[in-house]
Image (cartoon, grey):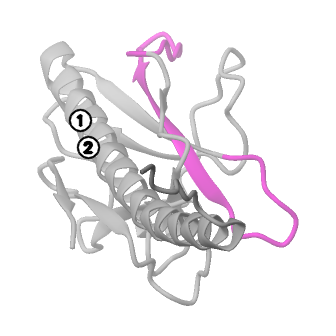
Amino acid sequence: MKGICRGFSLLEMLLVLALVAAVAALAMEGYSATVQAAAVTTGADMLSDALTEGRASAVAQNTTVEVRIYDLPPQPGAAPVYDALQLHWLKANGTTPPVASPLLLPAWVVIDATAAHSPLIAANGQTATPDASDTRLNSQTRVFHFLPDGSTDLNPATNWFMTVRAATQSDPANFPSNWACIAVDATTGRSRIYRP
């Protein structure tokens, strides 16, 4: 005697598909947060490494190194954000050749430009040395200098730092939930990363 083979009904299949879709949606939310956190950490590490390289280059070559922090093209009504950094020599003849290629942050992260989150960007009024060959240079570019002794030209009475955050967190009134802070000691020129 043969048994009757029974398949799944349409309703049962739809319920299983709905359950799989719900679990996938929850997993994607967690995955997205993890990817953003990794990108913030990577961006902070990249910036800190570049600042360390700039300080070391200034000391090794006994010359001033200009750190240029570049902004993204502004969006209407949005606060400015920054996404790149480049080191330039300040030569005695007035030229400013790059020390290295521009450092671009990962696509998911930016440097916050609000005063509370990044005084190195918002409260730093220094202007870049004129350089016709630098196509990213504009009035929003922020700069500071590593001097040949390894120190900076920043005011030592101020705490200088910049905050790297996920690009999707753009409320300047609230501190981002996912961030890393790169602090620069004005006297020694050393940088440190702070991460919650």
Query: Label 2 to label 1, Cα distance in Å?
Result: 6 Å
Compared to residue 81, the image places residue 55 above or below, namely above
Tag nearer the camera, 2 or 1:
2
User: Where in the figure is residue 116, as x and y percent of width and height?
Assistant: 45, 81
Q: Residue at left 40%, top 52%?
A: 35
Left of 140 or right of it: where is 155? Answer: left
List the single residue furthest toward the right.
76
**Which range is magenta?**
72-100
List the single residue furthest toward the bottom.
173
Q: Amino acid at mark 1?
A: Asp
Compared to residue 165, the image places residue 133 above or below, namely above
Answer whether residue 149 is magenta in the image: no
Where residue 45 sits, quadrant-wise, is top left
Q: Amino acid at mark 2?
A: Asp
| Mark 1 lies on residue | 49
| Mark 2 lies on residue | 45
2 and 1 marks in contact (CB < 8 Å): yes
Mark 1 lies on a secondary structure that is helix
